[in-house]
C-alpha cells in the first residue's frame, strides 16, 4: 500500500505544471525514500525497444501490427485445419517465416546499435560534487540525479540540463555551442544566476539553501521559466539564458558549475529526439487501394471456386470412389464442403496478395537513396557535404511535385550579407562611392566626443551598429562557417582612400583564425565575431570598417573602440532580443561619457517608423526636419535594388525601468510581462538612419527556376522582406518576367473577374495569361479568412508565380496547407532557417538548405541540400527515375502474381474446383521467393527510361509524373487484364498439346511452370529501357537458378509431397522436344500483344523525335552546352 501511495505521489510530482527542486547535498548517503528529488528520473537513458529475454515476443507483437503479416499468419493457421488445408501445413509456414525472420534480424541489429550507443553515452565521465569529500568527484553520466551539482570544463559535453550558478569567467558568462541540438555552430552566451550561492573566493555548492521552482519539462529549446526562492522568500528569476542544455559543448570557458534541473529522458534534447518521421507517399496510398482490389479479386475467384465445387458435387449421380470419406464414414453435405472449399481456395491462391512487395519496396527505396546521396553533381565541395535523405519512404514523391514554396533569404540568395548603403539623418551614403566623406564626418564626431561630452547622429548610428546585437567576440576558437570569406570582407573596407586620409582603425578583419599565443593582443586583426545571423555580422563588420570596433561583450557591459582610438565601456542594463512579433531588438546602456541611459534599437522599417517621436536634434531646419520621410524614400530605393533594409533608432532615458527583473521572476504570463516592458521602453524613438545590405543570388538560381517552370512546377516565394525587395529578387531570379501582369491588389473579386473574362474570350483559347501575384502579410491574412479563401485559391491557381511578402512563419505553413488541401496537389517546401521549419513540415516534401542560418531547417526536413540549384537534378532526374521505377515495379509485381496464380485458377475448371495444384508446392513457393524475386528489385533500382541528360535538357518530360502519373487506375487494370490473357495462353497451350494423353499431373504442370517463368521474365525484359551487365547477370541467373534448383529437387525428392511423386519430372521433360516447343510457343503468343503495344509507343516516340518543334527545343537547349564544352576544352590546350 505504501509503495502504491509513493508511486502515486511520484506521478503527481512529475505531472505538476510547476516542480520544486532541492539540493541533494544535505541528504547525501540517505536511502532513496528520503531523497527530496526521488520522483524524478535519473540521467541514464534507454533508447532500445527490446530486451534480450523478451525480444522474440515483443518483435512478433510489433510485426503483427502490420495487416499483411496478420493476413498470411491467418492463412497458415487455416492450413492446419484438416477440413480446409490445401497442402502440407509446414510448407505454408515457409514464406511468412522467412519474412518475419528477415525483419526480426534487421530490428535486432538496429536495436543492438542503439544499445551500444546508450551504453557509451551513459558511461561518459563527469564531475559531481560530494559533500563527504568536499570536492567534485568523477562519476558517470548515468549517476547524475536531479538536485546534484555538476561541474563541466571547456570542450566538454554537458550531461544534463543545468541551471548555471557559477563560471570561471569573472563576469559570470559561459559560452556554449548548440550544434548537437539545433545545428548552429555559433557560440551562445549563458549567464550565471547570481546571489544564490557563495562564489568568493571559491564556489561553495553547500551554501545553496534555496528552492528552485521551474516548469515541467518540455521540448522547447528556446524557452525556460523558473526562479530560485531564497530562505527570505526573495525570488531570483531564471530563464533560458541561464540554462545549459544536455548535449551542448562548453567553449571559451575554463569551467562552470550548474544545478541539475532535468535529467535523462526529461531533458530538452531527449524530448526533441522523436526519431525519424514517417510520411506516407502518394504512391503508397494508391498501392493500398490496389491491394484492396486484389483482395476483392481473390475473394471473387475463391467464391467462384466454392460455387463451382458445389455444382460439381451436385452434378454427380453417385459418389465417385476417389472421394474418400472422413473417419465418420460419411461425406459432408455439398454446401458444407463448398464452404470449406472457399477457405481452401484462399490458401491456394494466397500469393495473389504479394507478401514480398512491401519488403521489395523498402529495399528499392534504400537503393534509390544510395544513388541519390552518391550523386557527384549533388555534392558541395566547398562545405564537403552531400545531399542527406532523412525520410526513407517518400523518394518517389520527388517525381510528382506540382508546387514549390521557397524562402528567399539563404534559399534563393547566398545569405552572405555585404554592407552596401546607409542613410544617416536623411543623407544617403553609398558604401563604395561616398564612404570617404562619411568616414571624415565620423572621425570628426568621435574626436569631439570626449571634449564636448555630446553625441551626434553619426556617432550614435555606428555605435548602434556595434552595440545593438547579440554578437559574441571570440579570439581562441577555430574558424566556423559563420565567419565571412575574404571576398565579402573586402567589401567592408571603405573605398576611395587616398594618401591624405588617415585610415587608422580601418584594417579589414582577417577571415583566418589568429595564431594562438599565451597572451593574445586585443587588436582588430585577432578578433572574430560569432553572430546568430549574417545580418548582425554584416552590421558589426561595417561598423568596424568605419572604425567602431566591437572589442568585447559580457552580460553587463560592452566595449567599443572609436576611430580616434578611445575605448568606451558601456554598462548594459537591459537587452530585449529580437522576436517575430516585435520585429526589432533593443539594448539599453549607460553611456560612459554623457552618463545618460540610452536605448539603441534596430528593426524592420515598419516596426521602427510607427514608434518614432520628434526629429533628432533641434537645430536641424528645413527639409532635414522631415528625416523620416526622406529615410523612407531611401528605404524604398534600397528595396527596389534588392537590398535588405533595417532602421536604426535611439532613445535617451532619464531613468531605468525596474519592471524587467519582476517579469523575469514570474512563471505565469512571463512572455506578456516581458513584452509589456519592451513596449514601455521602445516608444518615442529618435530615427538615426537606415542600412541597405546586399544578399546576392545563389549560383544558377534563374536557370533552376526556369527549368522547374518548364517542368510544370509552379514556384512560390514566401519571404519576410519588403514587397519592393521581393519583386526585385523575383525579376533577378527569373521568377517574374517583363511581360508578366504583376498584381499587387487586395481586391480579389476584381482581379479574379479579369482572369475569368480573359479565359472566356474565344480569342484566348489555348493561351495562358502571364499573371503573377505579389501580396503582403496583412492582405494575405485577410485572403486566408474563411469567407475569402476559396476566391483566393481560385485566383492563385491562374498565376504563374506568387510572391508573399512580410509573412510570418505561421503564415508560410498556412499557405502551404491551404494549397495542398484545396488543390489536391503535391507540394514541396524549401528553406534554410528556423522560420521555415513550419513550412517545411507542412509540405508533402520538406527540403532544408544547409546555409548560414543554422541547421534547424535541415533537421526538420526530409531531404537536405547545399544549394538551391541542386533541386533541378534532384527533381527532374532522380525524382523522375524514383517515381517511374517504383511505379513500374509495383505494377509488374501485381502482374506477376496475378499471372502465376491464374494458372492454378484455370486448372480448377478441370479438377472439379478441388483446390488441386498441378505444380509441386515447394516449386510454387520457390517460384516467388527465389526465382522471380530479384529481377523486379533490380528493375526498380536501375532502370532508366530516359537519360539524365535528356531529362535536364527537356524539363517538360517531368510532367509525366504529375497528377495521376504513370501509376494510374487504368494502368493497373490493363496490367491485370494482360496477366489474365498471358495466364490463359500459358495454361491452354500445354493443355491442347497434351489433350487426350495419359501424362500425370506434374508432367502437365512442369512445362507450364517453366513457360510462366520465361513469360514473366521476358515481360520484364520488354519493360526494361536500359540494359546493363547487371541486368543480364540477374535475368540469366534467375533462369539458371530455376533449372538448377528444379533439377536437383526432382532428382532427390522422391516422396517430398505425398501422395504425389515429382521424382525426375523435369529431367524427363527436357528429353522431350515437345517441352521446348511448348515453352517457345507459349512465350511468343503470350507476349505478342505486349510487344506490339510497346513497339507502337516507340513509334510514337520516333514521331516526336521527328517533330521540328522537339528538335527546336533540343537544339536550343543542348547546342549552347556543346559550344561551352568545346570552348572549355580548347582553353586547356
Image (spheres, helix red, strand yellow):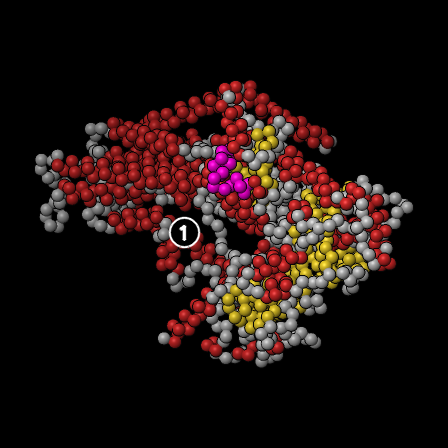
576 vs 858: above or below: below
Q: Residue furthest right?
A: 500
The one nearer the camera, 1082 or 244, is: 244
Q: Position of residue 768 (x, y in %)?
A: 54, 26
Relative depth, front residue between 143 and 363:
143
Q: Residue at x 26, y 37 (%)?
A: 300
- Picture coordinates of residue 880 (x, y %)? 50, 35
Residue 1122 lies left or right of residue 764; in this view the side is right
Residue 445 visible to an observer of this rendering: yes
1091 left or right of 958 in image: left
Q: Residues within 10 Å of mark 1 (few under 14, many from 20)?
A: some
Task: Place residue 281 in its image quadrant.
Answer: top left
Who's the residue at 49% across and 58% down the image? Answer: 113
**The one of 519 and 1055 positioned closer to us in this rendering:** 519
Q: How many marks?
A: 1
Question: Which range of residues does the magenta coloring cover?
Answer: 780-798
Q: Quadrant of the N terminus?
A: bottom left
Q: Secondary structure at mark 1?
A: helix
Q: Is residue 45 visible?
A: no
1121 over 289 or under it: above or below: above
**Secondary structure character of the magenta stretch overall:** helix
Residue placed under numbered mark 1 in the picture: 103
Q: Residue at x 80, y 55 (%)?
A: 455
In depth, the one of 1080 and 142 nearer the eye is 142
The picture places residue 711, in percent across and down from the top left corner, at 54, 31
In the displayed structure image, the side of residue 174 where residue 990 appears, left or right: left
Q: Quadrant of the C terminus?
A: top right
Q: Is residue 577 left or right of residue 47?
A: right
Amino acid at each position: 500500500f505504501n509503495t502504491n501511495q509513493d508511486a502515486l505521489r511520484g506521478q503527481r510530482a512529475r505531472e505538476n505544471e510547476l516542480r520544486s527542486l532541492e539540493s541533494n547535498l544535505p541528504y547525501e548517503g540517505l536511502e532513496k525514500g528520503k531523497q527530496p528529488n526521488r520522483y524524478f528520473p535519473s540521467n541514464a537513458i534507454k533508447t532500445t525497444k527490446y530486451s534480450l529475454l523478451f525480444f522474440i515476443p515483443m518483435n512478433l507483437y510489433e510485426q503483427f501490427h502490420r495487416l499483411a503479416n496478420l493476413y498470411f499468419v491467418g492463412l497458415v493457421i487455416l492450413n492446419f485445419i484438416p477440413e480446409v488445408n490445401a497442402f502440407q501445413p509446414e510448407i505454408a509456414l515457409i514464406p511468412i517465416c522467412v519474412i518475419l525472420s528477415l525483419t526480426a534480424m534487421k530490428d535486432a541489429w538496429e536495436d543492438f546499435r542503439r544499445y551500444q550507443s546508450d551504453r557509451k553515452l551513459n558511461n561518459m565521465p563527469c564531475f559531481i560534487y560530494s559533500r563527504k569529500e568536499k570536492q567534485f568527484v568523477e562519476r558517470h553520466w548515468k549517476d547524475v540525479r536531479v538536485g546534484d551539482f555538476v561541474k563541466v570544463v571547456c570542450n566538454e559535453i554537458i550531461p544534463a540540463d543545468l541551471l548555471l550558478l557559477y563560471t570561471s569567467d569573472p563576469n559570470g558568462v559561459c559560452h556554449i555551442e548548440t550544434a548537437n541540438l539545433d545545428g548552429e555552430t555559433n557560440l551562445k552566451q549563458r549567464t550565471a544566476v547570481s546571489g544564490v550561492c557563495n562564489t568568493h573566493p571559491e564556489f561553495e555548492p553547500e551554501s545553496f539553501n534555496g528552492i528552485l521552482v521551474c516548469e515541467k519539462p518540455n521540448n522547447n529549446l528556446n524557452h525556460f521559466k523558473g526562479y530560485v526562492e531564497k530562505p527570505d522568500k526573495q525570488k531570483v528569476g531564471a530563464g533560458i539564458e541561464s540554462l545549459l542544455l544536455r548535449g551542448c559543448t562548453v567553449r571559451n570557458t575554463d569551467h562552470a558549475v550548474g544545478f541539475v534541473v532535468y535529467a535523462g529522458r526529461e531533458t530538452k534534447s531527449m524530448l526533441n529526439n522523436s526519431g525519424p518521421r514517417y510520411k506516407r507517399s502518394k504512391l503508397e496510398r494508391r498501392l493500398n487501394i490496389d491491394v484492396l482490389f486484389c483482395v476483392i479479386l481473390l475473394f471473387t475467384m475463391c467464391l467462384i471456386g466454392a460455387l463451382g465445387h458445389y455444382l460439381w458435387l451436385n452434378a454427380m449421380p453417385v459418389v465417385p470412389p476417389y472421394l474418400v470419406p472422413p473417419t465418420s464414414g460419411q461425406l459432408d453435405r455439398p454446401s458444407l464442403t463448398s464452404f470449406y472449399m472457399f477457405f481452401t481456395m484462399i490458401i491456394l491462391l494466397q500469393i495473389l496478395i504479394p507478401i514480398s512487395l512491401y519488403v521489395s519496396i523498402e529495399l528499392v527505396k534504400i537503393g534509390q537513396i544510395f544513388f541519390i546521396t552518391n550523386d557527384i553533381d549533388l555534392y558541395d565541395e566547398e562545405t564537403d557535404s552531400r545531399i542527406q535523405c532523412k525520410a526513407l519512404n517518400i523518394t518517389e514523391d520527388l517525381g510528382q511535385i506540382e508546387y514549390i514554396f521557397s524562402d528567399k533569404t539563404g534559399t534563393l540568395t547566398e545569405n552572405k550579407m555585404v554592407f552596401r548603403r546607409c542613410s544617416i539623418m536623411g543623407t544617403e551614403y553609398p558604401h563604395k562611392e561616398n564612404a570617404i566623406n562619411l568616414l571624415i564626418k565620423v572621425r570628426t564626431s568621435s574626436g569631439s566626443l570626449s571634449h564636448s561630452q555630446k553625441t551626434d547622429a553619426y556617432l550614435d548610428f555606428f555605435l548602434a551598429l556595434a552595440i545593438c546585437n547579440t554578437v559574441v567576440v571570440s579570439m581562441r576558437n577555430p574558424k566556423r562557417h559563420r565567419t565571412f570569406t575574404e571576398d565579402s570582407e573586402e567589401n567592408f573596407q571603405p573605398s576611395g582612400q587616398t594618401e591624405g586620409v588617415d585610415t587608422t582603425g580601418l584594417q579589414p578583419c582577417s577571415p583566418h583564425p589568429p595564431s594562438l599565443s599565451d597572451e593574445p593582443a586585443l587588436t582588430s586583426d585577432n578578433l572574430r565575431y560569432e553572430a546568430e545571423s549574417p545580418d548582425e555580422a554584416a552590421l558589426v563588420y561595417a561598423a568596424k570598417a568605419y572604425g567602431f570596433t566591437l572589442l568585447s561583450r559580457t552580460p553587463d557591459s560592452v566595449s567599443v573602440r572609436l576611430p580616434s582610438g578611445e575605448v568606451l565601456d558601456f554598462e548594459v542594463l537591459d537587452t530585449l532580443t529580437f522576436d517575430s512579433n516585435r520585429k526589432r531588438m533593443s539594448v539599453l546602456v549607460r553611456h560612459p561619457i554623457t552618463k545618460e541611459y540610452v536605448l539603441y534599437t534596430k528593426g524592420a522599417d515598419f516596426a521602427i517608423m510607427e514608434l518614432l517621436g520628434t526629429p533628432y536634434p533641434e537645430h536641424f531646419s528645413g527639409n532635414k526636419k522631415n528625416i523620416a520621410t526622406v529615410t523612407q524614400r531611401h528605404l524604398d530605393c534600397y528595396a527596389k535594388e534588392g537590398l535588405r533594409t533595417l532602421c536604426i533608432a535611439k532613445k535617451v532615458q532619464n531613468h531605468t525601468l525596474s519592471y524587467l527583473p519582476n517579469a523575469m521572476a514570474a512563471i505565469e504570463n512571463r512572455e506578456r510581462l516581458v513584452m509589456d516592458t519592451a513596449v514601455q521602453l521602445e516608444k518615442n524613438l529618435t530615427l538615426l538612419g537606415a542600412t541597405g545590405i546586399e544578399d546576392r543570388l545563389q549560383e544558377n538560381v534563374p536557370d533552376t527556376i526556369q527549368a522547374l517552370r518548364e517542368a510544370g512546377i509552379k514556384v512560390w516565394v514566401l519571404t519576410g522582406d519588403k514587397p519592393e525587395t521581393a519583386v526585385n529578387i523575383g525579376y533577378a531570379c527569373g521568377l517574374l518576367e517583363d511581360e508578366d501582369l504583376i498584381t499587387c491588389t487586395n481586391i480579389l473579386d476584381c482581379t479574379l473577374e479579369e482572369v475569368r473574362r480573359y479565359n472566356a474570350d474565344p480569342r484566348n483559347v489555348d493561351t495562358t495569361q502571364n499573371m503573377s501575384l505579389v501580396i503582403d502579410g496583412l492582405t494575405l491574412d485577410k485572403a486566408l479568412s474563411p469567407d475569402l479563401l476559396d476566391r483566393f485559391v481560385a485566383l492563385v491557381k491562374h498565376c504563374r508565380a506568387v510572391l508573399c511578402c512580410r509573412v510570418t512563419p505561421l503564415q508560410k505553413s498556412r499557405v502551404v496547407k491551404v494549397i495542398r488541401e484545396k488543390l489536391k496537389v503535391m507540394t514541396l517546401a524549401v528553406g534554410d532557417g528556423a522560420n521555415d521549419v513550419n513550412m517545411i513540415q507542412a509540405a508533402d516534401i520538406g527540403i532544408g538548405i544547409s546555409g548560414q542560418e543554422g541547421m534547424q531547417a535541415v533537421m526538420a526536413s526530409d531531404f537536405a541540400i547545399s544549394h538551391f540549384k541542386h533541386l533541378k537534378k534532384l527533381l527532374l532526374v532522380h525524382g523522375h527515375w524514383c517515381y517511374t521505377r517504383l511505379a513500374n515495379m509495383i505494377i509488374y509485381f501485381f502482374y506477376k502474381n496475378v499471372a502465376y496464380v491464374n494458372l492454378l485458377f484455370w486448372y480448377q475448371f478441370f479438377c472439379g474446383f478441388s483446390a488441386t495444384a498441378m505444380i509441386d508446392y515447394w516449386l510454387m513457393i520457390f517460384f516467388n521467393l527465389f526465382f522471380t524475386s530479384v529481377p523486379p528489385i533490380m528493375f526498380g533500382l536501375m532502370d532508366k527510361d530516359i537519360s539524365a541528360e535528356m531529362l535536364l535538357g527537356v524539363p517538360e518530360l517531368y510532367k509525366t509524373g504529375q497528377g495521376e502519373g504513370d501509376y494510374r487506375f487504368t494502368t493497373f487494370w490493363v496490367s491485370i487484364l494482360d496477366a489474365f490473357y498471358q495466364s490463359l495462353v500459358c495454361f491452354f497451350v500445354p493443355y491442347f498439346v497434351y489433350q487426350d494423353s495419359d501424362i500425370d499431373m506434374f508432367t502437365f504442370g512442369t512445362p507450364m511452370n517453366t513457360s510462366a517463368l520465361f513469360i514473366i521474365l521476358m515481360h520484364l525484359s520488354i519493360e526494361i529501357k536500359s540494359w546493363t551487365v547487371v541486368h543480364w547477370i540477374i535475368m540469366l541467373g534467375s533462369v539458371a537458378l530455376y533449372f538448377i534448383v528444379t533439377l536437383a529437387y526432382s532428382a532427390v525428392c522422391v516422396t517430398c509431397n505425398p501422395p504425389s511423386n515429382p521424382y525426375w519430372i523435369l529431367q524427363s521433360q527436357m528429353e522431350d522436344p515437345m517441352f521446348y516447343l511448348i515453352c517457345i510457343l507459349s512465350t511468343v503468343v503470350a507476349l505478342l500483344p505486349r510487344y506490339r503495344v510497346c513497339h507502337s509507343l516507340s513509334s510514337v516516340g520516333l514521331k516526336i523525335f521527328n517533330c521540328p518543334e522537339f528538335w527546336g527545343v533540343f537544339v536550343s537547349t543542348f547546342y549552347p552546352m556543346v559550344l561551352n564544352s568545346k570552348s572549355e576544352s580548347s582553353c586547356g590546350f
